[in-house]
Amino acid sequence: MINTLKKLFGIGPKVDYADLVKQGAVILDVRSPGEYKQGHIKGSINAPLNDLSRHIPKLKKDATIITCCASGIRSASAKSILKSSGFAQVHNGGGWSSLQNKI
């Protein structure tokens, strides 16, 4: 149970998000368009969680994807959805402002 929760929320070994971005990782911001307009990471893609399935065909299955939102809860859900859709390299970056400081 604990390992499942850790995996869902991206708790575990440290991830070098800056390195992933340098290597071409896609940052997927799953907040609403209104939230995204108020501030976001430059170059990120806005794909609201409730509309994520519409964006999945536009993403490459072999791409490294970093999900983010306001606090990390929606991004954890997005990570789970992407993993179950066949994406292998998905990381929960948590809150977008925190992630921005890490890259």
Image (spheres, rainbow, N blue to C red):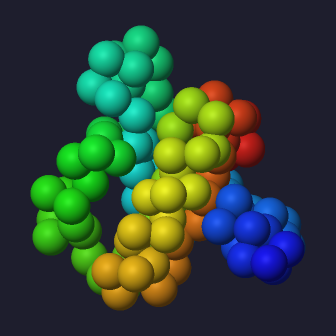
Quarter where residue 81 is shown:
bottom left
Q: Position of residue 23 (x, y in %)?
A: 52, 69
Identify which residue, 62 or 88, lies in the foreground.
Answer: 88
From the viewer's perspective, tell me whether residue 93 is left or right of residue 15. Answer: left
Is 11 rendered above or below residue 31?
Answer: below
Q: Residue drawn at (48%, 33%), measured in percent from left and top? A: 41
Quarter where residue 76 is shown:
bottom right
Residue 20 seen by the camera: no
From the viewer's perspective, tell me whether residue 48 is left or right of residue 38. Answer: left
Q: Residue drawn at (73%, 77%), measured in percent from left and top? A: 4
> What residue occupies the far front of the structure in this picture?
1
Q: Position of residue 40 (x, y in %)?
A: 46, 27
From the viewer's perspective, tell me whether residue 50 is left or right of residue 84. Answer: left
Identify which residue, 15 or 70, lies in the foreground.
Answer: 70
Identify which residue, 22 or 75, lies in the foreground.
Answer: 75
Q: Residue drawn at (15%, 70%), measured in percent from left and top? A: 57
Q: Residue drawn at (40%, 34%), measured in percent from left and top? A: 31
From the viewer's perspective, tell me whether residue 52 is left or right of residue 73. Answer: left
Q: Position of residue 27 (x, y in %)?
A: 45, 52
Is 66 rendered above or below residue 38?
Answer: below
Quarter where residue 11 is shown:
bottom right
Task: Quadrant for the N terminus, please.
Answer: bottom right
